[in-house]
Amino acid sequence: MKVMYLDESGDHNLQVIDRDYPIFVLGGVILESPQAEHEMQQKLDALKRELFGNSQIILHTSDITRNRRGFERLQESEFRNEFYARINQFMAESQFMITACAIRKSPHTHSLNPIKTDAYLRSLSVLSGLFANEITASKSQGVIIAERRGNQLDNQLITAWEQFLTQQGATQFSAPNWASKINLQLRSKRENLAGLQLADLVVGPIGRHLIGKSPKDDFRIIERKLLRNEKGQSDGHGIVIIGENEGPTPATQSSTQKSKVN
């Protein structure tokens, strides 16, 4: 059983364009088995106890960068350096793969289809296809775990997922019978799931890289874990980029079989 945890960076509304960050990234962290999940959870909980004396503190980029909600000590430069070094070590030593879909925003983006105008839903269609190909290749089952984002957005996501499964969405999946192999779950970050926290740590560095910021140690670690094709290429697999008037890549095909939403 493979699991893909999702998190986002940037505003999902394609009509909202931040000049300093004109991009949306949905990132997926793929774990190979429940055992890998369990081991990662144990290691992350132990690391947080060592650093903060509390395994229940939730790693959230916005709180980390603003030194709030338990991360106030990061204002101390020595501790901050230790924190980032230990987190990077944790990522480097953990076994997982990364895939991400990035959408470069344009003032000309327009469509009557909400799946095409909502960056989250459009990116999800791409990552679901890539994940479907992964689990099909390994003859496995899969679960996608997305963070809850509020009732309205959660309902939109569930509706879009059902559209994907009934050939009404913006995606086409190449993996045969993919819908019978993947379930979608919505979980809260407050549940302290290591996979969701890891996905949170991954998407920001990918976004910074794509807008031209100098890479830091975290992105160098992420780059080594990007999903790759049989030729070792990450473009279109580890990172899919959608620009103005571009559609999701790689191309896919859908199935009418339904998958459960929890």
Image (tube, helix red, strand yellow):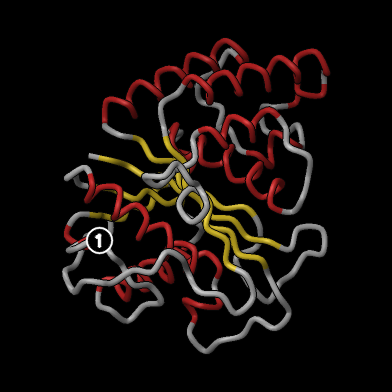
In the rendered image, the vertical position of residue 69 relative to residue 134, given as above or below: above
Q: Amino acid at mark 1?
A: Ala
Measured as percent of width and height from the top left, residue 28 is found at 46, 47
Q: Nearer the viewer, residue 191 or 156?
A: 156
Q: Looking at this view, name the residue that lies furthest to the front.
A: 231
**Residue at image x 57%, y 61%?**
241
Q: Looking at this view, name the residue that lies furthest to the top.
A: 50
Q: Which image quarter is the N terminus in?
A: top left
Quick check: 188 left or right of 174? right
**Residue at image x 71%, y 47%?**
208
In the rendered image, the vertical position of residue 133 relative to residue 34, given as above or below: below
Quick check: 30 left or right of 46? left
Quick check: 234 left or right of 211? left
* Residue 27 seen in the figure: no
Q: Nearer the viewer, residue 221 or 147?
A: 221
Q: Which image quarter is the C terminus in?
A: bottom left
Q: Residues within 10 Å of mark 1 (few under 14, many from 20)?
A: many
**Residue at image x 29%, y 54%?**
133
Query: Is label 1 in a helix, a strand or a loop?
Result: loop
Circle 1 is placed at which residue position? 175
Measured as percent of width and height from the top left, residue 188 is found at 44, 46
Q: Looking at this view, name the residue that lies furthest to the bottom.
A: 112
